[in-house]
Image (cartoon, helix red, strand yellow):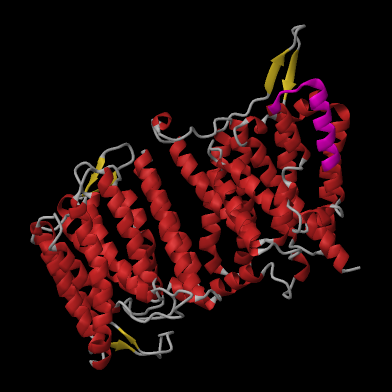
Amino acid sequence: MEVAATPIILALALSVLGILALRRPGLALGLVDKPGGRKVHARTVPLVGGMAVLLAFGLALLLSPVPPAVYALLYSLSVILALVGLIDDSTGLPPLVRITAQLFVALLAVYAGGPILTDLGAWPGGAPLQLGALAAPITMLALVGFTNSLNMMDGADGLAGAVALVILAGLGIAAVLAGNTHVPLLAATLGAALVGFLAFNLRAPWRRRASVFLGDSGSLALGFALVWLAIETAMLPGRVISPLGIAWLLALPVIETLNLIIRRLMRGQNPLHPDREHLHHILRRAGFSVAQTTLLIVAGVVVLGAAGMSAAWAGVADEWLWLGLFILGAMHLVFTERGWRTVLALQRLRQWDLPGRKYPVLAGPRLSPGRQRLAVVGFYLLVVTVPFSFNTPALGMAALALAVVTPGAGFSRTMLRQPFAWVAAVLAAWVLLQGLLSGAPMHSLWHCLALSGVVALPLGWWLAGNVRHVVGGVLALCAALFVALALIDTAGVGALPLPALMSASATQGLLLSLPLLACAGLVVRQARRLRRARLREGLLGLLALGLAAGLGYKLMLLATPLVARVEAGGVMRVRTDLTQLIELAGLPALALFGAVFALLLWALWGLWQQHDWPRRWVAMLVLLAVVLVSAVAVAQPLAGPSGALVYSLGLAVLFMAAIHHDRLRRLTR
């Protein structure tokens, strides 16, 4: 253990010392990045970070237990690319010269003993997707392509280094699962050198801007080393993570580069021509700070890598992973193809619930920063894990309720003005009283309390002040459902070391209906824009239509029969969630349940009449109310492990609309 830790610690120390030693000579020799043009920094910054990382990595490997034959070719070719980048940093090289040098290095890597990408996982049905004679050219393409991908991503302080660090961590985990020891040690050593560099490159409270950059010398060498290790990990003989799982770890930089080339070719531009339409440029123009931009993109790499590798480890078929990558690529192309429109959309999303803007009344009372963070974590924990039978959805709902309901948040003051909240509270109290008097089991009592709507009140109040999280919640729920459906279709799901997926078909049907309504609304919106000859909206419309079709198909496959119960006299009676409520609390409970939805529909009618919201939104919410009532009237969706929380999610959106109607009505008095 001490021998393995020595090169890691040494790489970290040498990287820090190397940057401190090279900064002054770099400035003296003019090896700097000057502000101006496409550059956003305001001062001259030395480009010596990459050299320091490469030197620290090479010197630390001399003391590692990894045999030199394992890393000698990798390091030698990385040094060649670093020298090419160093010349480009100092004097500038034409793009064709840079690409030619990279192709030459890739050719050496393939024919001098480097790793070869021999397969890309499996075909549908399980047969391996062998590359055969295409293995060498595709490997060269992968080496050159990702090398440039990381170079193009090096446009914000800490971005390329942090993304590389995440990828190295994922590759190390995949190699450990495969029983390999050399790749994890190489990844950890290079990662330690990167940590030393990020200490000078990441923005922090004590440093407002980066004091050193990677430079082309660093980004080219680092990108080459990453894709080398990725191919080697994907081709390990005892691999547990398939090549498609590794591809998800590298997906965001690669998709960014491919879409950039496609956009430039569509406009008749040179694909190597620089511009300001990278993802980090779009986020910066939308108002995100440099640190926030870096955090968002790195978080995206973490989420995609974790999702893809977890799915591959769990045995999800490769065709699902391919489909996910294509969907991600299409979404990214839609997001970035019209940069100015994306910027405006992001700005509206960021300002949607801020006071002093177009709709100041929609904000409502603001939570303290600590409570807001707790509520956000609870909300996304709820929506991401609700398709699974974990205990975490209930934990997420409890965290959000704790942040909202405790004194000082303004929740009770708002609820006292809402008639639907009074009716829901009366229904909950009546159900609780009748349940305690009759000795009803706890699960029946919980289901009936969820039907009353009191469980959804805190979430509805919070969403009314954080409307933009409705969009984020729908996207997170769609992603979670995609993973859940992929796992359902995977053979041997029961053997997974995870709790089983929700098995109640009625619960699954209700859960699929929630994002289906959102996708249908987006399809209608895009169709209206297409009718106005905005043909560029077609791709987003097709994507939404595809998602809606997939969710609808899965919904039709679910069998949700009425649950029959045989009484003592041989009489067959239908048992649904609504009949269970009547059995527990009688017809008064049914009347109160109907009153809650009548008040919600009245609020939606007010939004429709006053044009306070787009009418397609109101129509979607009316459909949501119909779906919720129909589901509990004809089946038992609350019988699933998270059925009550799924129902509460949909009901909370209706509560949000009713609260908005009340605030808008009070504003116009």
> In percent of the image, x 51 and y 62: which residue is there?
539
When asked about the image quadrant of residue 644, the answer is top right
Q: Is residue 433 magenta?
A: yes
Q: Nearer the viewer, residue 158 or 617?
A: 158
* Residue at 50 percent of width and 73 percent of height: 283
| Quarter occupied by residue 529 | bottom right
Left or right: 567 with respect to 310? right
Q: Which residue is drawn at 56% across and 49% down?
A: 381
Vertical placement of 534 versus 232: above or below? Answer: below
Give the left or right position of residue 109, taking residue 34 as reference.
Answer: left
Q: In which quarter of the image is the C terminus?
A: bottom right
**Magenta span dominant secondary structure:** helix
Q: How many labels does the image show?
A: 0
48 magenta-colored: no
Residue occupying the far top of the picture: 569
Q: Is residue 144 visible?
A: no
- Along the viewing direction, whichever of 17 and 651 lies nearer the viewer: 17
**Residue 365, image x, y percentages:** 75, 63
Task: List the single residue furthest toward the front.
Answer: 2
Residue 129's x, y, as percent?
Answer: 25, 45
Q: Nearer the viewer, residue 218 or 554?
A: 218
Residue 336 point in image, percent of width and height: 47, 70
Residue 281 location (% of width, % of height): 46, 76
Report whether 310 appears left or right of 404. left
Q: Is residue 268 shown above or below 242? A: below
Q: Could one spot residue 642 in this view of the protein?
A: yes
Q: Which residue is drawn at 44% across and 76% down?
A: 277
Residue at the limit of the structure toward the right, as seen here? 669
Q: In which quarter of the image is residue 345?
A: bottom right
Write the start and end of the magenta stretch as one range. Answer: 425-442
